[in-house]
Image (cartoon, rainbow, N blue to C red):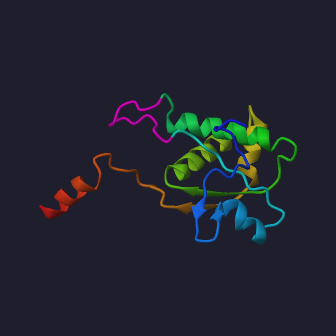
Amino acid sequence: MSNNSPTRSRSRYLSTSRKRVFWPYDLLRHDLPNARILTYGYDTHIKHMFLGEQSNSSVYDVAWNFLVALEAERRSNPSRPVIFVAHSLGGIVVKEMLRRSSGCQLYQPHLHDIFLSTRGIVFFGIPHGGADPRGMAHKGRRKAH
């Protein structure tokens, strides 16, 4: 599969003194033996209204592509329960993907199935309130005054 589709690849590992660990596969599969564990990769240098274009894709584009790719991966069992685990920008992508999926009930019900099958979301370090593109230096200066 391409980088922009759910995959079972072990491309991102945690290093330990004993061996490399890809935690979604190597750790979760023991606790959830019947789960299919998929990852989704995308270019994180997306369009930003303040920073200018770094990529041709926006969060909305990435979320739509994720929705379509995930639906294709789940086509043989579209009602299988889903739990998303997302970090940073990935959480924004998941939220937008589910928002788009929720609106598909009339004209694209096959895409709406993902919204209906979602049982949970685990967020790690998601900028739910947005992120200031000027960074921490600006926030520090503002607090100093």
Residue farthest to the top? 56
Q: Main secondary structure of the magenta part?
A: loop
31 lies above or below 65: below
Q: Residue furthest left?
A: 145
> x, y percentage for residue 143?
19, 62
Q: Residue 13's x, y, as percent?
A: 61, 58
Given the current orientation, which residue lies at the most extreme right position?
76
Of residues 104 and 37, the one nearer the viewer is: 37
Relative to 140, does residue 42 appear above or below in the rendering?
above
Residue 74 picture quarter: top right
Question: Residue 44 location in percent, x, y?
Answer: 49, 42
**Left or right, 48 with reference to 44:** left
Residue 9: in magenta span: no
Tell me, yes or no, if residue 120 can be seen here: no
Closer to us: 30 or 132 = 30
- Which residue is painted at 71% across and 60% down in the image? 25
Give the quarter of the figure containing the C terminus: bottom left
Determine the image quadrant of residue 102.
top right
Q: Which residues are magenta?
A: 44-55
- Residue 95 x %, y %: 57, 49
- Residue in the image at 83% along x and 50% along y: 79
At horizontal 57% and vertical 37% (from top left) the residue drawn is 62
Q: Residue furthest front?
A: 18
What is the quadrant of the N terminus in the image? Answer: top right
